[in-house]
Image: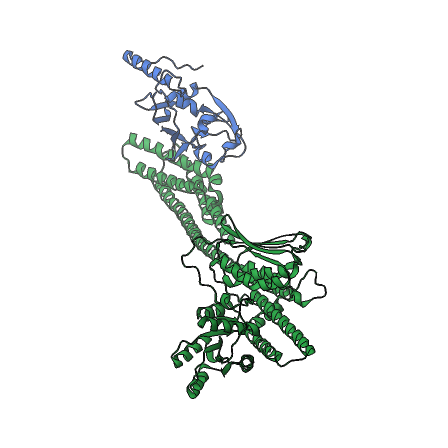
């Protein structure tokens, strides 16, 4: 493109060189020759003497003009035309013409007409030659001009092509760069993602999170299966008691029982913890009456408190809160249990009060207190103060870590006020229930059946009671049956409601009580089984459900069934007491 | 200074002339001549026609050799395209001629005896001593010598004047100036 520009410039300069001057000069010479020729013609044509005199002056004038233009001007005004051969020839011939006819061009001479005529002809032919030169110059200029326009067109085309290709190139580059940058971005994003995943994985590896989570998931799933043997163990141990007579034997059996108990607690706590960590704990909020909750606490822990010679002071407040029943019970249970374990003498107080829009539940004791620097550590797993020998009767040290998780899960603020020698006060802050519904929530079936070693109950006599036990686990069935048979009950075992009905029909035997496991074979639930038997007999036989499930959903389902609920592993005495209560209620 | 001579005047035209003169005097273009030049007695060398206010023949201003000589003579030496070496020219400043014609044209057409015409434009005529020369090297110019009158630019004294346009404006064998 630049080459084109240079060429055009050169041509333009060349065009300028054939300037106006040269062109005008050529025109002028042509004109001068013509007018000279014409003046001679006019003179020769004239007939009157005065006219002729004027005309003679005229042609002399014209000759002089021609003379001046050839002799005085040509060299300067021809410019580069003087390079032209035709122009050079013309100059030579013009000069010769001037010389030849100069003598004729005097005022005092009367020129010969023939000679004048010859002069005229020559002038005309020279004029023609000048004209030709002018024409050539003009044509040449036109050609040059066409050249230039053509070059200009080429230039425009080149320019457009150049611009378009430049734009195209730019667009392509932009597109290319943007794809590159996008790819770079995505790569960076990938890298970042990978890096974060990697770091998370590393963190989990180093903190044992992966293992713990795997463990938790395993535990949560295994919960049910783990409870079954323990439940059976408990039952068998109870049955064994009556067969052991020696003091030594009884003491050994008591130890075995204690170990089984410890194992129970361990299992419960660990399972609770893992469930919480695995996030499989379902939370369902409802309006709760604190009084009912406290009543339950009282019933649960009063015997223990009495045994330890401690005061358990439960204060009723009439307050209602918005939280999860089961989980809140567990929190309070853990706190009270801890208090009982660690307080040597004095009182454990459970109370509630209003603070703004919140309810504050307080569990305080007169125990040794927790030093300030231990306030965080006590919530760690397996951490226990004052239990260097790991006395299992003091629990496992999981209680508070469970409390911590549960409070976090339920969005409850937990505060501890304590110091060495000043006792301990745990405070829970939770949402007050805004409206109190007319119908107070039904008392959990838990309340009715939970460990109530009520001293008022008369010695239990279950002899002759016909009990139907439905459980798909052989050992559990057997264990329960063994225990109850010891009580002289008429026990029939069945692994399914179908088997039970078969037996009933075949033997025309009607049970007075049905004890069913909640989870039976083939997705059958305990309450359904009970209903089936009831239908078969067409009687509303009293029944209760024992369940190894502690998942809150199952608990709720089971509770919703309306039957009293017992939890595996069930302490044998509790089972017997519950049956007695049930029987008593019937009678 | 200049000596116009008296010449014949008519009485009533004196009044008109006075008014015209006053009017002209109000115009900032410095036209200072009160009267037109006298009509030529010898052969007319130069005709000034067109837009002028002080004619002496009809509505044209004709000048002969005598009239031209009466103007203040301006002389300088300069090279020309036509001749070798510097030439010494004497003539009348064009701006003076215009004043005498009662005009201040922005452009005019110069015509040569060979019927060559060129339109001269621009301010150079006003600013520089561009002359209508009637003597070259102390002698009158014949037609063959590109006279008797020719427009000459002081190219030597003022090199900035030497443009193609001005070279074309230096019309020789000058016979007529048409003011616009």
Farthest residue to the bottom: give it. Answer: A506
Q: Position of residue A472 (x, y in %)?
A: 51, 81
| Residue A4 seen in the current view | yes
Question: Along the horizontal axis of the image, is A199 left or right of A440?
Answer: right
Q: Position of residue A360 (x, y in %)?
A: 54, 52
Q: Which residue is nearer to you in this view: A47 or A112?
A: A47
Q: Which residue is nearer to you in this view: B83 or A556?
A: A556
Q: Which residue is nearer to you in this view: A213 or A585?
A: A585
| Residue A186 seen in the current view | no
| Total numbered labels placed on residues in the image | 0
Question: Along the horizontal axis of the image, is A325 left or right of A233?
Answer: left
- Say above or below: A410 vs A538: above
Which lettered chain is shown in blue?
B
Looking at the image, which residue is at 57% across and 67% down? A272
Q: Position of residue A450 (x, y in %)?
A: 53, 67
Question: Along the horizontal axis of the image, is A198 left or right of A124?
Answer: right
Query: Which quadrant of the view contains residue A365?
Result: bottom right
- The quadrant of the rendering that contains the C terminus of chain A is bottom left
Which lettered chain is shown in green?
A
- Say above or below: B6 vs A512: above
Question: Along the horizontal axis of the image, is B38 left or right of A151?
Answer: left
Q: Position of residue A412 (x, y in %)?
A: 54, 56
């Amino acid at each position: 493109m630049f080459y084109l520009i240079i060429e055009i410039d050169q041509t333009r300069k060349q065009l300028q060189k054939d300037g106006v001057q040269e062109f005008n000069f050529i025109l002028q010479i042509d004109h001068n020759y013509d007018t000279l020729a014409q003046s001679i013609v006019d003179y020769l044509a004239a007939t009157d003497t005065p006219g002729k005199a004027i005309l003679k002056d005229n042609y002399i004038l014209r000759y002089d003009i021609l003379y001046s233009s050839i002799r005085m001007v040509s060299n300067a005004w021809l410019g580069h035309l003087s390079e032209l051969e035709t122009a050079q020839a013309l100059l030579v011939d013009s000069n010769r013409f001037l010389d030849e006819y100069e003598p004729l061009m005097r005022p005092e001479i009367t020129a010969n007409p023939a000679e004048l005529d010859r002069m005229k002809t020559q002038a005309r032919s020279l004029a023609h030659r000048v004209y030709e030169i002018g024409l050539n110059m003009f044509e040449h200029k036109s050609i040059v001009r066409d050249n230039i326009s053509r070059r200009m067109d080429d230039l425009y085309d080149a320019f457009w092509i150049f611009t378009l290709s430049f734009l195209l190139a730019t667009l392509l580059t932009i597109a290319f760069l943007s794809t590159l940058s996008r790819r770079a971005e995505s790569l960076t994003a990938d890298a970042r993602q990978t890096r974060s995943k990697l770091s998370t994985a590393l963190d989990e590896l180093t903190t044992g999170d992966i293992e713990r989570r795997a463990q938790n998931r395993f535990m949560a799933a295994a919960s049910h299966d783990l409870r079954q043997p323990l439940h059976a163990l408990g039952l068998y141990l109870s049955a064994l008691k009556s067969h052991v007579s020696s003091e030594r034997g009884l003491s050994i059996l008591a130890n075995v029982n204690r170990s089984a108990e410890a194992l129970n607690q361990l299992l419960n706590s660990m399972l609770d913890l893992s469930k919480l960590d695995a996030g499989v704990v379902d939370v369902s909020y409802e309006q709760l009456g604190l009084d009912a909750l406290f009543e339950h606490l009282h019933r649960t822990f009063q015997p223990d408190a009495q045994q330890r010679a401690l005061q358990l002071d439960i204060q009723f407040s009439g307050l209602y809160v918005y939280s999860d029943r089961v989980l809140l019970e567990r929190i309070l249970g853990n706190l009270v249990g801890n208090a009982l374990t660690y307080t040597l003498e004095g009182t454990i107080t459970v109370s509630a009060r209003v603070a703004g829009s919140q309810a504050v539940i307080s569990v305080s004791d007169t125990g040794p207190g927790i030093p300030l620097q231990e306030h965080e550590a006590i919530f760690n797993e397996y951490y226990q103060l004052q239990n260097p020998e790991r006395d299992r009767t003091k629990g496992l040290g999981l209680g508070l870590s469970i409390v911590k998780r549960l409070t976090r899960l339920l969005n409850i603020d937990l505060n501890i006020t304590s110091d060495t020698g000043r006792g301990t006060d745990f405070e829970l802050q939770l949402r007050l229930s805004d409206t109190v519904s007319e119908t107070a929530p039904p008392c959990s079936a838990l309340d009715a059946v939970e460990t109530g070693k009520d001293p008022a109950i008369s010695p239990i006599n279950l002899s002759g009671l016909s009990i139907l036990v439905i459980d798909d686990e052989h050992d559990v069935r057997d264990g329960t049956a063994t225990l109850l048979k010891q009580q002289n009950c008429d026990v029939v075992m069945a692994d399914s409601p179908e088997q039970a009905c078969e037996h009933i029909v075949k033997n025309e035997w009607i049970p007075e009580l049905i004890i069913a496991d909640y989870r039976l074979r083939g997705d059958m639930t305990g309450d359904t089984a009970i209903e089936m038997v009831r239908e078969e007999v067409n009687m509303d036989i009293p029944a209760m459900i024992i369940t190894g499930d502690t998942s809150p959903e199952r608990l709720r389902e089971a509770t919703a069934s309306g039957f009293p609920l017992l939890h595996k592993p069930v302490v044998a005495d509790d089972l017997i007491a519950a049956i007695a209560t049930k029987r008593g209620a019937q009678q | 200074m200049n000596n116009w001579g008296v010449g014949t005047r008519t009485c009533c035209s004196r009044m008109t002339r006075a008014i015209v003169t006053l009017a002209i005097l109000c115009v900032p273009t410095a036209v200072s001549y009160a009267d037109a030049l006298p009509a030529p007695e010898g052969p007319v060398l130069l005709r000034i026609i067109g837009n002028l206010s002080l004619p002496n023949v009809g509505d044209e201003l004709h000048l002969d050799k005598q009239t031209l000589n009466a103007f203040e003579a301006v002389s300088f030496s300069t090279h020309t395209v036509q001749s070798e070496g510097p030439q010494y020219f004497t003539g009348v400043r064009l701006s003076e001629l215009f004043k005498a014609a009662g005009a201040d044209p922005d452009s005019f057409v110069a015509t040569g005896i060979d019927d060559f015409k060129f339109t001269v434009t621009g301010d150079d005529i006003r600013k520089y001593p561009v002359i209508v020369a009637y003597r070259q090297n102390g002698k009158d110019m014949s037609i063959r010598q590109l006279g008797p009158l020719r427009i000459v630019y002081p190219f030597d004294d003022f090199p900035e004047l030497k443009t193609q346009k001005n070279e074309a404006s230096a019309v020789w064998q000058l016979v007529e100036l048409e003011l616009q």
